[in-house]
Image (spheres, rainbow, N blue to C red):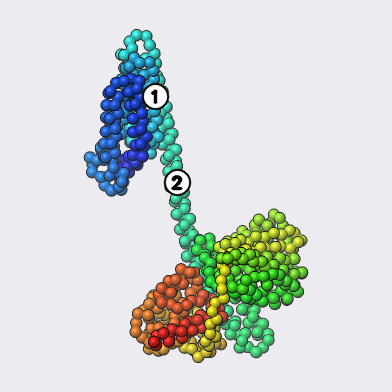
Amino acid sequence: MSRTEVQGDVARAAAARRANTCLRISATVAIGLLWQVYVTEIWGWIWAAAYTCTHLLELWVSRPIVLRPDAPAPAWRRRAATIAPFVTSTVFGSLSIPLFASHVRFAPTLAGMLLGGALLNVVVVNARSRIATVMAATPHAIYLMIVPIIAKAANPGPSLADGLWFGSAMLIASVTVASRTLHTALKAEADAKAESERRRHEAEEAVAAKSAFVAMISHELRTPISAILAGAARLHSDVPEASSKVHAQLIADAGGLMRTLLNDLLDFSRLEAGRMSVETAAFNLRQALSDSFRLWRPEIARKGLRLRVQGAATLPRWVAGDAMRLKQVLNNLLSNAIKFTERGEITIVLHAQPSPQQVLLSIEVIDTGPGISETALPRLFTPFDQLNAAVVRQHGGSGLGLAISRELARLMGGDLTATSALGHGARFTLTAVLETAEAPRVEEEDRSITGLRVLVVDDHVVNRRAIELVLQPFGVDATLAESAEQALELLGSEVFDAVLMDVYMPGMDGRQATRILRAGGGPNRDTPVIAVTASATPKDWEACAAAGMNAHVAKPIDPAELFGALAQVLAAEVAEAPSNAA
């Protein structure tokens, strides 16, 4: 055992004995009182004082080692702390000598109980340190072995004094076995704890590695998906032939499906890692729900189904919460209801329970589909579980939608539950807690972005071309830059109305480039910068804002979202202009 390990062993034992101080001093005082009452000799208090002083000396010697176990201690202090338990036990057990030699009835019995109790205390208190256990137990064992000699000298003649040898040996053996058993149990516990900690650390590393892998894959996949969606949208608007428009729409639908699957994987990864959060912002609840219903009405009509909405008029108009996540859950429920219902209707039952500060929203989605069996219902919210192979073959999907929806509902203070029976459709109930809010002040009409000069900065040519395709229908003049360094050169010589800056690029990233732009004195020092990134988390947005970016959009680029971000930063720039002029 190395010096460091020995010092650690001594420190642990000293700390355990230190924690036992009150019990040991209280026992000493109690024994002194009993001695005074029944034996009426003053030297019992002398023993108590001697033991107390010895114990206090042990506390003083071991104090620096206990307080700073990792710090090197002087050799004399280490040796003194190691020997201290032996000295303290020697003083404590010395009371057994006069008790064994006493003619008072039951005095030898008290001596045996005193040493037996002391040995048990030594085993329990010093169980984590063999050195301390041996040092503290040795004096008591010696006292027990000389008991027969003292007893026979004090009481000569035929007696059971010789039998004390056997009793003492049995007690010492029993305490030794107990000590070894306790030490083994504590070692097993420590090993199990260390193994558990190691596995926890490995699990955390695995989750971190998986999150990093998912983030990397998402970044790589969003590039081709952006190009697919942008190219399909441009093709659909440019080609006159109806057949070509159908093909373009097919490409767009496939790209949208890929984006949905990717978003599900990312959301599940964030939820699993505990990184998902919901926002709180005022929104028009009726309008948000109406938008979702309007989105699915064509698909419902195409399948020959009916959509019934009940209770919409009872909902409050303005609430505060995460409108995007609420619509995400509702869209998933509607998508599933349409997917599995071949005939009949889909009924939406809306209900709100308002209070002065909050609104408990309840949305029931009821379909007339085939229903779900009683055995399959418990697996409904299990990630990656599609209930049966026929569902996978016929409808596809990742099996993550309902699992994500339930976790999002719980993040919004509610839940998502399901009831169903074979042949009787299914009923999904979404609840969410929203805050009461007032209608925001009506802003002026958004400024047109036609004719704007926008610098698009991205290290990937596909991304640059995709963003350019999205901007062209809006009449925006896009200049492309393939690196942050090239972008800073252009920003130093030409004037732009806005900058679309990729956040993660090799070499200088988008945030660093924005900080350099803001710190300089060029013509675009105050030009709005919009972050464009695949890593769409609140932490990323906060870092972008701290770097001086004004807004953000996520990849794959959604034309409406990009238009809104450009209009937002330009409107803010116009609002700030009068105050700057003043």
Q: Judging from the image, what secondary structure is the residue with disc 1 in?
A: helix
* Residue indicated by mark 2: 193
| Residue positioned 44% across, 38% down in the render | 185
Q: In screen coordinates, is 517 left or right of 243?
A: left
The amino acid type of the residue labelled 2 equals Lys
> Which of disc 1 and disc 2 is earlier in sequence?
1
Q: Quadrant of residue 308?
A: bottom right
Q: In screen coordinates, is 505 left or right of 218?
A: left
Q: Nearer the viewer, residue 249 or 81?
A: 81
Q: Residue 207 carries which label?
A: none
Q: In which quarter of the image is the N terminus?
A: top left
Q: In this view, does 209 lie above or below 178?
A: below
Q: Label 2 to label 1, Cα distance in Å?
A: 36 Å
The amino acid type of the residue labelled 1 equals Met
| Residue positioned 64% across, 79% down in the render | 250
* Residue indicated by mark 1: 113
Q: Nearer the viewer, residue 33 or 362?
A: 33
Q: In screen coordinates, is 335 left or right of 31?
A: right
Q: Quadrant of the C terminus?
A: bottom left
Q: In which quarter of the image is residue 205?
A: bottom left
Task: Confirm whether residue 90 shows in the render.
Answer: no
Task: Confirm whether residue 373 shows in the render.
Answer: yes
